[in-house]
Image: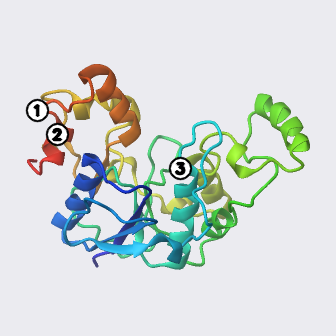
């Protein structure tokens, strides 16, 4: 049973990794729906474009106060999209290796030994974890979840100062994989998590495999892998530092971006 996949792009132009991610799903026979808040200049042919306001209309893009990254908005959007639609959410640095032909509506997997990732995500509407995560919004205020002992002291006083600390001022990734994993444990849905090799066969610590010449190959993917996560922002930083921002010709990421893999 082929699943319909979708994602969000904030901006007017896709990068090479994002375009390659979309094309990888199209090559596997998936229709790809892309939500946007503004027109795109270079969307791949065949993509179904939809107004992101259908899912989450806040009148603004919610960004992390320190980094100004829209990743927080993306987190809010993905939970809303999974709750409101039948799409499988995929980050735009996920490269599909085979069709997403799952029969279950529980589609997520471990990204490390003890943490579940959100880069591929689908949950049934009645999921308790999904309901808990969907409760967060741009108006959420208060103490952030899952603070360390040191953080708890700092954020206790910040919360008092702001009379309820806005979600934009919470620590980076506060409603990401760590909280997702905790909510899955709380609801006992963690048992539905797919093995690490399904979506995250290469850990973030090994991203040079994707950029180094003669590094990762399609044939290196373990049997049963559905996709590989390129860890896009981390990979881009590595390529900028080591290769002046240019993907080496014989690297996995360059082959993927040129549909030569």
| Circle nearer the viewer, 1 or 3 | 3
Please state the horizontal and vertical placement of residue 25, each as a whole percent of the image. Answer: 24, 63
Which quadrant is home to the N terminus? bottom left
* Residue at x-position 42% and y-position 66%: 36
Q: Which mark is residue 70?
A: 3
Looking at the image, is 95 positioned above or below residue 211? Answer: below
Q: Which residue is mark 2?
A: 254
Q: Secondary structure at mark 3?
A: loop
Residue 132 falls in which quadrant of the image? bottom right
Q: CA distance from mark 1 to mark 2?
A: 6 Å
Looking at the image, is 218 positioned above or below residue 26? Answer: above
Of residues 244 and 60, the one nearer the viewer is: 60
Q: Secondary structure at mark 2?
A: helix
Q: Earlier in the sequence, mark 1 or mark 2?
A: 1
Residue 97 falls in which quadrant of the image? bottom left
Q: Is residue 138 left or right of residue 217?
A: right
Q: Earlier in the sequence, mark 3 or mark 2?
A: 3
Q: Secondary structure at mark 1?
A: loop
Q: In the image as oriented, which residue stretches furthest toward the top? A: 242
Please state the horizontal and vertical placement of residue 26, each as a whole percent of the image. Answer: 20, 67
Please state the horizontal and vertical placement of residue 142, each as a whole percent of the image. Answer: 82, 51
Q: Do the residues under discs 1 and 2 have CB atoms within 8 angstroms?
A: yes
Please state the horizontal and vertical placement of residue 104, each as a whole percent of the image. Answer: 41, 74
Q: CA distance from mark 1 to mark 3?
A: 31 Å
Residue 237 falls in which quadrant of the image? top left
* Residue at x-position 40% and y-position 34%: 234
Q: Is residue 103 left or right of residue 131?
A: left
């Amino acid at each position: 049973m082929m699943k319909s996949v979708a994602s969000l792009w904030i901006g007017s132009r896709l990068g090479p990794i994002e375009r390659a991610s979309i094309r990888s799903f199209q090559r596997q026979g998936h229709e790809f729906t892309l939500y946007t808040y503004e027109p795109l200049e270079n969307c791949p042919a065949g993509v179904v474009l939809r107004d992101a306001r259908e899912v989450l209309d806040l009148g603004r893009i919610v960004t992390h106060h320190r980094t100004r990254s829209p990743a927080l908005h993306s987190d809010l959007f993905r939970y809303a999209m999974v709750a409101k639609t039948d799409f499988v959410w995929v980050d735009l640095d996920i490269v599909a290796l085979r069709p997403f032909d799952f029969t279950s509506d529980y589609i997520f997997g471990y990204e490390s030994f003890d943490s579940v990732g959100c880069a591929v995500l689908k949950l049934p509407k009645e999921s308790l974890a999904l309901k808990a995560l969907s409760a967060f919004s741009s108006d959420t205020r208060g103490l952030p979840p899952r603070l360390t002992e040191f953080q708890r002291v700092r954020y206790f006083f910040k919360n008092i100062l702001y009379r309820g600390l806005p979600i934009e001022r919470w620590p980076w990734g506060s409603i990401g994989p760590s909280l997702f994993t905790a909510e899955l444990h709380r609801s006992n849905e963690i048992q539905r998590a797919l093995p690490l090799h399904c979506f995250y066969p290469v850990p973030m610590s090994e991203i040079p495999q994707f950029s180094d010449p003669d590094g990762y190959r399609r044939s290196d993917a373990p049997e049963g892998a559905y996709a590989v996560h390129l860890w896009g922002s981390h990979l881009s930083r590595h390529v900028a530092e080591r290769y002046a921002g240019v993907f080496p010709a014989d690297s996995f990421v360059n082959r993927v971006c040129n549909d030569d893999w």
